[in-house]
Amino acid sequence: MALAQQFIKEGGYVCSCLFQNGEFCFDITNDFESVLSFGGSKYVKSNPSGVYSEVLQLLKSGNKVLFIGLPCQVAAIKNYIGQRYEESLVLVDLICHGTPSPKLLEMFLNQYSKGLKIIENIKFRLKEKYQILVNEEGIVCRGVSDKYSIGFIKGLTFTNNCYSCNYASVERVSDITIGDSWGSEIVQEKNRGISLMLVQTQRGMELLKNSDVNLLEVDFAKAIENNAQLKHPMVKSIHRDYFFDNIEKKKLIHLFLGFILRSVLNKI
């Protein structure tokens, strides 16, 4: 959020993903409070429909825009905007492991008498705890990883194109890349959480230095070693096709996924 708030402070707009009216969509704001809705991990595919043209209109009007999204979304808006306004568009992409379809999330929630259209808010992670919280309550119980989250962590539930992603490499399409800093040696910061930031352009470096962020140099080789999707896409589980074939046959996701995870958790 520090990058977004600094960008607004400098007179710009921020565009990113949020959960709104039952959908994971994109919005644009230049309000300090509103930008907070963009925070938090979202382990589901988001829909940027319509927002690229809105960003272009802001750029044509002489505004600057910070766009934060998945690498594929960053590549898309970069291609859509073209070179004419690229100096006014700052791009931040995330180290993405892959994303499941919202339909899969909806199926999971429905088993607990919940649905995207009827809940007020949803969270996918609290620091090191991987779990879905709906209206601040854990789907299973607070502090316990549920089967949707475990399936995500193991790369079992992503849409098929994620396993052949062209953007899962050290060659990034953005000005700044953000992800979790796994394998960090900064022990005193681990409880608060540490972010890895890779800067590709001078434009990105200026924004980062102006923001309220505590910056420390990292071992680049170690950062890549501990972030597999800086080297290659998530490896497709040999059980993924079987899983989705059975989901399409309307088998209950929590029973089936529970069986899969108990049987092959160490093999996926």
Image: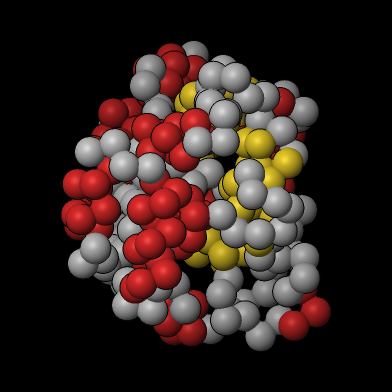
Q: In the rendered image, is residue 52 in sight? A: yes
Relative to residue 173, is residue 121 drawn left or right?
right
* Closer to the camera in the image, 74 or 205: 74
The quarter of the image holding the N terminus is: top right
* Closer to the camera in the image, 214 or 141: 141
Residue at 49% across, 55% down:
147
- Image coordinates for residue 228, horizontal then vertical, percent: 38, 72
Relative to residue 133, is residue 51 drawn left or right?
left
- Image coordinates for residue 69, horizontal then vertical, percent: 46, 41
- Image coordinates for residue 117, horizontal then vertical, percent: 54, 19
Residue at 66% across, 85% down:
185
Q: In the rendered image, is residue 230 in sight? A: no
The quarter of the image holding the C terminus is: bottom left
Instruction: Indicate whether 11 appears above or below 175.
Output: above
Q: Quadrant of residue 114?
A: top right
Instruction: Indicate whether 119 appears above or below 165.
Output: above
Type of colouring: secondary structure
Instruction: Indicate whether 69 appears above or below 34.
Output: below
Query: Furthest-right residue in view?
Result: 188
Residue at 66% across, 59% down:
144
Question: How many numbered marks does the figure carry?
Answer: 0
Residue at 31% across, 64% down:
234
Q: Quadrant of residue 264?
A: bottom left
- Image coordinates for residue 206, horizontal then vertical, percent: 60, 53
Instruction: Indicate whether 233 appears above or below 29.
Output: below
